[in-house]
Amino acid sequence: MQDKIQRLREQKKLASVGGGLDRIEKQHAKGKLTARERIELLMDRNSFEEIGMLKEHRSFDFGMEKQQFLGDGVVTGYGTIDGRLIYVFAQDFTVFGGALSETHAQKICRIMDLAIENGAPVIGLNDSGGARIQEGVDSLGGYADIFYRNTKASGVIPQLSAIMGPCAGGAVYSPAITDFIIMVEQSSYMFVTGPNVVKTVTNEEVTSENLGGASTHSTKSGVTHLTAANDLECIQHIKKLLSYVPQNCNQKTKDLAYTLDDEYRDQLQDIIPANSMHPYDMKEVIQGIVDDESFFEIHASYAENIVVGFARLAGKSIGIVANQPYALAGVLDVESSKKGARFVRFCDCFNIPLLVLVDVPGFLPGTDQEWNGIITNGAKLLYAFSDATVPRVTVITRKAYGGAYDVMNSKHIGADMNFAWPTAEIAVMGAKGASEIIFKNEISKAENPSEKLKEKEVAYQEKFANPYRAAARGFIDEVIEPRETRRKLIKSFSMLENKKVLMPNRKHGNIPM
């Protein structure tokens, strides 16, 4: 036993000797990092304190009594990242393939309990082949114990999951409950059933990468929020993500020092094309509003018709939800509604104010959307905004049509401040479609129906397709020039900083699932 302890101490020392970080980064070029190397890169230097280093499994079947490893395949403990208390566990694939046993699970649960009790984020570095089959139901029970704590911690402390190797079977459900998932390209994968089972059951032939790799989950399923080229970049993503979120639900994100200056941004003045049918990149609008180089996009490759991410405005952390005219003209569909709703819920959990940028022509029509539940999924985004109590500010840059106008953080569902650019078109539908319906008889009887339609389009546009009618009703607080958007937003969020909302007494709402 003493020999085992000595070897373990030497292993720990190797990861933290002078120049250790440089050595680890060089080692990365040769392949995956070890569990301890990952922790060493993640935490502040010499801050990590390990818990449960001497714990061993209690399985004595199938020759397991002869295979005892201190720590039982997972390194757990606490330390600091940028001076903040953080709890972490890192699965060790070199011990039983990182397979989860009863004691392995107990170590992770211990860390999660401490994180909840002390109000600090928990980070999981996942690299496991799944349940340790030699333990049977004991390992399955261990997974359930972890899932239960993930659920208890949800909305209480931030939970981040990095998938840095295999994550299969029941193991996938713990990351799925956490707030954000980051996957390493080409070396990580997630799936409930692997390629062999898929082939047996459905006769489909698929590789692990195509079935559940980082590219698949970042573009098709939306399971993962961020991808990284390697372990080092994955850890950098974790640190950056943490910088935008608070320690727990009772705190706010720490502000960065900022001195107010000339906050006008002339580059926004002509960013909207003269032709309302032409697209533009909403990310350029975001970059023109937020602090330099501060926008951190989440879910960038999934449901690209909506953009979500974190940024800083005058040094303060905010969440951004924006329609993207470059993709599907910025319409709302099943995937974008789910993506937006999830992000809004996270920001509301952790006191992060929301900025909503609107250019939406409506919901995407079609049988595919209807059969895949656009009604329920669209309602998720509506519910998320309506239920959010953080400061919420909306800017309508161009189109805000139909029910999508209501859903995208309109004044009617509790937005605090609503601005519009002069280019905003707020109406039930576009001028052409509306004119074809309203003036159908008049157009059909005209000598030149096409000319009459154009005439009616212009008349409708002048009366409805602008922000001034909505402003006259109080649904828009102010029509502003694009160049003054940043200044108006800084003032608005500052005014709303101490917002308090009393919600109805209830156990919890029933969000459309």
Image (spheres, rainbow, N blue to C red):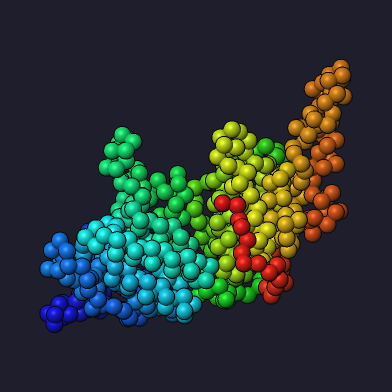
**Front-lying residue, 241 or 206:** 206
Query: Which residue is located at x 17 percent, y 71 percent?
Result: 68
Query: Which residue is located at x 38 percent, y 78 percent?
Result: 79
Q: Residue 387 in the image: x percent, y percent?
A: 66, 61
Q: Residue 92 in the image: x percent, y percent?
A: 26, 65
| Residue 182 placement: quadrant | bottom left
Q: Residue 412 in the image: x percent, y percent?
A: 76, 56
Q: Is residue 97 visible?
A: no
Q: Where is the N terminus found, in terms of image quarters?
A: bottom left
Does 444 sit above or below residue 481? above
Query: Which residue is located at x 47 percent, y 79 percent?
Result: 117
Q: Outermost residue, bottom direction?
A: 2
Q: Is residue 34 left or right of residue 407?
A: left
Q: Outermost residue, top direction?
A: 447
Does 254 sit above or below residue 355? below
Q: Residue 310 in the image: x percent, y percent?
A: 55, 62
| Residue 388 placement: quadrant | bottom right
Does 146 sit above or below residue 200? below
| Residue 419 placement: quadrant | bottom right
